[in-house]
Image (tube, rainbow, N blue to C red):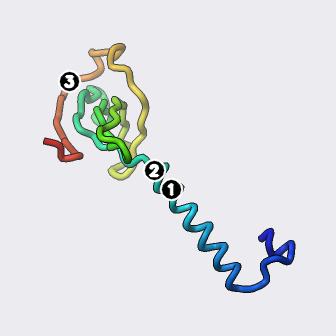
């Protein structure tokens, strides 16, 4: 756009080349910054009053390191295809509202 405004890029070939270069740069940025998806390994707790609320232990594979990132989150299942995720500290969990489940899902298929 700037090249057209300054009358530097006037051929169709140079315009197409600029779009290809920008597309490649955007693709490389997305590849190097995307961390991957969090996968539930264990459902730790389930809410007694609302079975759609769970507390899960999840893992995510690091792209360029050997290992996994870990987190414990509260998940509220709004629909089969939609979840609301929040960070949870299990040290201050009200045990009267949550039942311990320890359901092993192993979505990352680890041994």
Residue 43: percent from left, percent from top: 24, 33
Q: Residues within 10 Å of mark 1 (few under 14, many from 20)?
A: few
- Which part of the image, by quadrant, shows the C terminus? top left
Distance, label 2 to label 3, CA atoms, is: 33 Å
Q: Nearer the viewer, residue 47 or 87?
A: 87
**Residue on which the image places disc 1:** 30
The kind of secondary structure element at disc 3 is strand
Residue at horizontal 25 percent and vertical 27 percent from the top: 45
Confirm or deny contact between disc 1 and disc 2 (CB under 8 A). yes
Q: Nearer the viewer, residue 18 or 80?
A: 18
Distance, label 1 to label 3, CA atoms, is: 39 Å
Distance, label 1 to label 2, CA atoms, is: 6 Å
In this picture, is 20 found above or below 105? below
Q: Which numbered dot is residue 59?
A: none
In this picture, is 78 found above or below 24? above
Q: Which numbered dot is residue 100?
A: 3
Mark toward the start of the polypeptide (2 vs 3) = 2
**Residue on which the image places disc 2:** 34
């Amino acid at each position: 756009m700037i090249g057209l405004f300054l009358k530097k890029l006037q051929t169709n070939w140079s315009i197409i080349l600029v779009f290809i270069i920008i597309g490649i740069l955007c693709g490389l940025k997305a590849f190097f910054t995307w961390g991957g998806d969090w996968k539930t390994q264990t459902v730790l707790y389930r809410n007694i009053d609302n079975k759609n609320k769970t507390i899960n232990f999840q893992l995510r594979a690091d792209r360029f390191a050997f290992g996994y990132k870990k987190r414990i989150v509260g998940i509220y299942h709004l629909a089969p295809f939609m979840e609301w995720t929040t960070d949870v500290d299990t040290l201050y969990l009200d045990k009267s509202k949550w039942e311990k489940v320890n359901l092993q899902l192993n979505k990352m298929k680890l041994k």
